[in-house]
Image: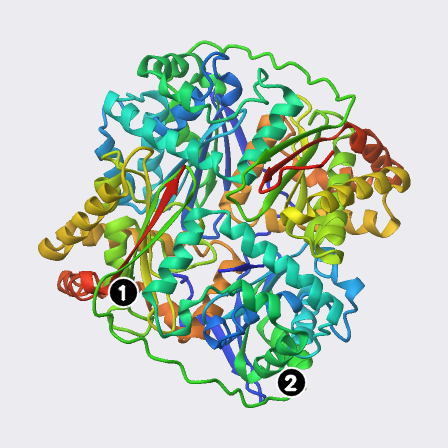
Amino acid sequence: MATLAPQSASAAAVHEEVLDNGLRVLIQEVHTAPLASVWCWYRVGSRDEGPGQTGVSHWVEHMNFKGTTNIPRDRVKGIIEQYGGYWNGYTWVDQTTYTETATRDALDHMLFIEAERMTNGLYDPADCESERTVIISELQGGENDPDQLLDQEMTATAIQAHPYRHPTIGWLSDLQTMTREDLYGYYRAFYVPNNATLVIVGDIETAAALKSAAKHFAGIPSREVRRHLHTREPEQLGERRVTIRREGTTAYFKIGYHAPAIGSADFFPMLLLDAVLSGAKGMNLWASFRTAPPQRSARLYQALVNTGIASAVGGALMPTQDPFVYTISVTATEGVPLSRVEDATLGAIEDVRTRGLTPQELRKAKNQMRARLVFENDSITNIAHQLGYYETIDSWRFVASVPERIEAVTLDEVAAVAERWLKASNRTIGWFDPAS
Amino acid sequence: MSTTTHAGLAPVREVLANGVRVVAKESRTTPAVTIHAAVYAGTVCDPSSQPGVAHFISRTIDRGTTSRSVDQIAEELDSRGVSLATSVNRHALSLVSTCLVEDFQSVLSIVADIILNPAFPEAEVRTRRGEIITTIRQDEDNPAAVASEALMEILYGDAHPYGRRTRGTTESVDTITRGMLQAFHASWFVPQALCLVIVGDVEPELAVDAASRAFGGWRGAAPPCVTLPTPERSRERRVRLVPMMNKAQADLAYGFTSILRSDPAYYSFWLMNNILGQYSIGGRLGDSIRERQGMAYYVFSSLDANVIPGPLVIRAGVNPANVERAVASIDAELSRFVADGPSDRELTESKQYLIGSMPRTLETNMGIANFLQTVEFFGLGLDYDRRVPALLQALSKEDVHAAARAALDPERAAIVVAGPYAGPLR
């Protein structure tokens, strides 16, 4: 539980069915191991939280592991482990999701768990209280990491109006004051079949899986989901800065640029631009972003790490429904002042903006993406993640179109996005300056 | 369409004439291959006067060979979308790479060149030294790293290879020279110290042939022996506090030395540890500290039975106001386990879980490669994946209870608290 495209997945391999209550069911048979993976996705995340309620989506996610009408609290432990299974969940800006992967004979059981979670959560008041301190511990553990703290401050400075500005875990005062009724009300408002996508992938038979899904979910009534309107983030008019001065050993530097959303024509050019700057990460936040990208020859690695200015550099363009921030993160080498890190980073970016990329660089970025798309779909859990993730922010069909869209990007398009998005007035610069 | 459950992994294993071990397993899940090369040149091989050399090697070995410049290696790998992960633990220095099947031969030859012919260019040594010192300084500001390292020092002593920090100290790293890296490489990087595991969409015979071409001509003497003293079992409870008042949360590390991986009691310890601090959300410890008392986002235990009695460590991150209550809860759970042993349900469920999770562990190329490296390092046998269910099924409540009695004693625990907390824990 945390806050946070298959090449082979042609659209034809996926069976799609929408139940009468609006639940979208996606099923893909993959017979490589005797396993099945289930993911249940909800279109609710920190974007849906208003003032005083930040962190409620994530807290609700935690409460949805605390028992249901037909899964008593003391039977939660081991409910999927009996099948050798693994379970987890995460909440981020646009989505909340729950997953189990276990032996294929557990499929019906996994669907039962997800149907219970959709409608029968207990929200015992004592459990709500106990989880309050667990989540505050999660928040404070995160704040122990200066890089994470800087990321939070930089994002909140870059985004002024859209709810993407606040951290998914929430602000501390909201976590201290929200009530059981806030949690339960939020759960009832968003956990309905017409706001969910159920994904089943693995060594299963489509018709039987669909029958089992209908058995557990068809009786859950749909209900209208009311969302408040989201403010559209206004154009940034000038560079912003945030500096954290705190005790620490190491200096960190970040730049956040407002970035194109998943539906924008600029998204893929921007993704390839990031690959040239910091190495290709792929498209799976669950899998690929955990391993180092191929980046030794990338622009920023060459300019910062190979020159000894930084010990690490990374870039992150996240696929999101609305425009989020593209972040470049740099760890300064011991003894190197942040001003020098900043100059070198901005110099490398300005070089791309003024002189563009070479055709070889773009080719390499595309090759990297092609390989990453294969690597990140090596398990049924990862394949299922991708279908649900993209269905929640766009469409599951997006996944199959990724290789073609990457291949179609031109040098001119990458030059145009560098010009448009990486300009000075669109950026927020963050420093973590350690005071001894 | 093959499954691994009934037939088992059944990998192919070959020892080349020079002593290189090759283990290959075909898997057609994706058109990719994972190459996992482990050289038994971990941090236990560091000269006692110069900790950090093995880690320094792991940061520089892939930065140029006698025939390829650092930029050439970067370009050859990056252009194929391949990242080469180099890492080091106490016993092995590993180079791990996943590539598309069409790139397998090329990537394997680069990996071989890196292992056999690293150049350690002076400029690279200089640049990477700055990176390593920065990483060490980051660790010093990280309560989780500080607590874990201090616990190992208490359990094994600062002169023991298990008790030293694996990355060395800033002082030591400052004085590591290119010559020291070359000398370490010459002694420890020898054919008998390499185990190469290849898993993916390539027939085992072809994988072994490719490995033979890449490594068959390598010559070298037997690696030196490292003598690792067996740690003395503690006779008393030891507590160390490392105040880090700039932090929001305190990290706890609480542990013991355990047993040898080769000890017949290992499987009882494995099951005992799963019940104590792993099963579902952190086993009994998670039930108490996270689920019932809401004190921590994470609490778990881990067991590292090894070629000497490795550590059994409990870790948790807690609010500084809850440090004493959290430690008292760990004490209470250990005492209860020692007094009563496991319940019937716990025994059954943990067995089901550990046995049932095998197909998941062995689903991906990387999962299989990691598993086969462990099998090879401890000499568990090529049919180990098939023997695990019976080994676990055979265990009784009394076996697990005996493991708890042998391992868990709050009066002999070593405890470290790193974070915004200055006492008064005992």
The residue under label 1 is which amino acid type? Answer: Phe
Coordinates of residue A3 in the picture (x, y in percent):
51, 60
Instruction: Please determine whether, in this image, residue A31 is positioned above or below residue A346.
Output: below
| Label of residue A268 in the image | 1
Label 2: which secondary element: loop
A304 or B343: nearer the eye? Answer: A304
Q: Quadrant of the C terminus of chain A?
A: top left
Chain letter for mark 1, please: A
The x, y position of residue A397, in whole percent, is 40, 74
In the rendered view, would you say A414 is above or below B176? below
Q: Quadrant of residue B406?
A: top right
Give percent across and percent down for residue B359: 63, 50
Are the residues flagged by discs 1 and 2 from a single subunit?
yes
Mark closer to the observer (1, 2): 1
Q: Earlier in the sequence, mark 1 or mark 2?
A: 2
Quarter of the image where one finds residue A178: bottom right
Identify which residue, A329 or B14, lies in the foreground.
Answer: A329
Disc 2 sits on a residue from what chain? A
**Considering the image in quadrants, where does the N terminus of chain A appear?**
bottom right
State the mark number for residue A218. Answer: 2
Judge by depth and name the residue closer to the eye, B410 or B311.
B410
Q: CA distance from mark 1 to mark 2?
A: 38 Å
SS at badge 1: helix
Q: Does A333 appear above or below A412?
A: above
Q: Residue at x 84, y 32 (%)?
A: B405
- The answer to whether any part of residue B174 appears in the image is yes
Q: Amino acid at mark 2?
A: Ala
Q: Is residue A87 visible?
A: no
